[in-house]
Amino acid sequence: MNGKKVIEIANKEIGYTENPAGSNKTKYGEWFGLNGEKWCGIFVSWCYYNAGFPLGNIGYKKGFAGCMTAIDHFKKTSEITLTPKEGDIVFFDWNGDKKYEHTGLFVRKIDNELFETIEGNTSINNDSNGGAVEIRKRKYKQAIFVHPKVLDVLVSLK
């Protein structure tokens, strides 16, 4: 239910591109205080914040910018999940070396091999620094999933 709100926010951003192209300059980076830096994690943090579920300090007061910092945080807080739900965070390890280079939002399972995401700073030509917010199809074998506790905690407070 709360993950759906995160995806509703992200859906409104599909098609947004950094300006100028190749600059990593976005409204997300401006909000976060790191404009001009790679922004996939910043985009995820922005979506959670604007859905009413701020992630809190994960290296930065408004969330996370680095994938490995976030993975370390979510492992320590036991938020890694094998059964992702709509709105959960997904991290990608393109090379199979346990170094996660990119992040996005889990939308839905397509089949046992593929799932759909909404990602910031991606494109068909550059998975991890492509400059746009897009819907992508990804492989489970390259991903690790996080179900942030903020989605559950706020539900119980209502």
Image: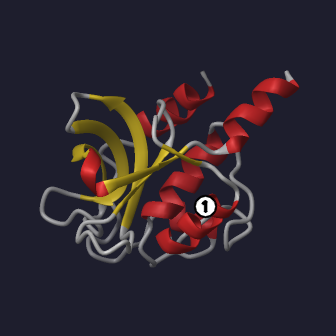
Question: Which residue is depicted at the point 57% across and 73% down?
Answer: 69
Question: Which residue is depicted at the point 41% across and 74% down?
Answer: 38
Instruction: Give the side of residue 130 with respect to residue 58, left or right.
Output: left
- Callout 1 amino acid: Lys
Disc 1 element: helix
Q: Position of residue 7 (x, y in %)?
A: 48, 33
Q: Would you identify the image quadrant in which residue 99 lies?
A: bottom left
- Tell me if residue 55 comes above or below residue 6 in the rendering: below
Question: Which residue is depicted at the point 34% across and 67% down?
Answer: 19
Task: Assign the N terminus to one quadrant of the image.
Answer: top right
Residue occupying the far right of the picture: 157
Camera-nearest residue between 31 and 41: 41
Colour scheme of the rendered structure: secondary structure
Q: Position of residue 3 (x, y in %)?
A: 56, 31
Question: Which residue is depicted at the point 54% across and 70% down?
Answer: 65
Camera-nearest residue between 106 and 30: 106
Q: In this figure, which residue is indicated by the disc labeled 1?
A: 75
Task: Assign the C terminus to one quadrant of the image.
Answer: top right
- Tell me if residue 22 comes above or below residue 49 in the rendering: below
Q: Position of residue 111 (x, y in %)?
A: 21, 28
Instruction: Give the side of residue 54 with respect to residue 35, left or right.
Output: right
Camera-nearest residue between 86 and 43: 86
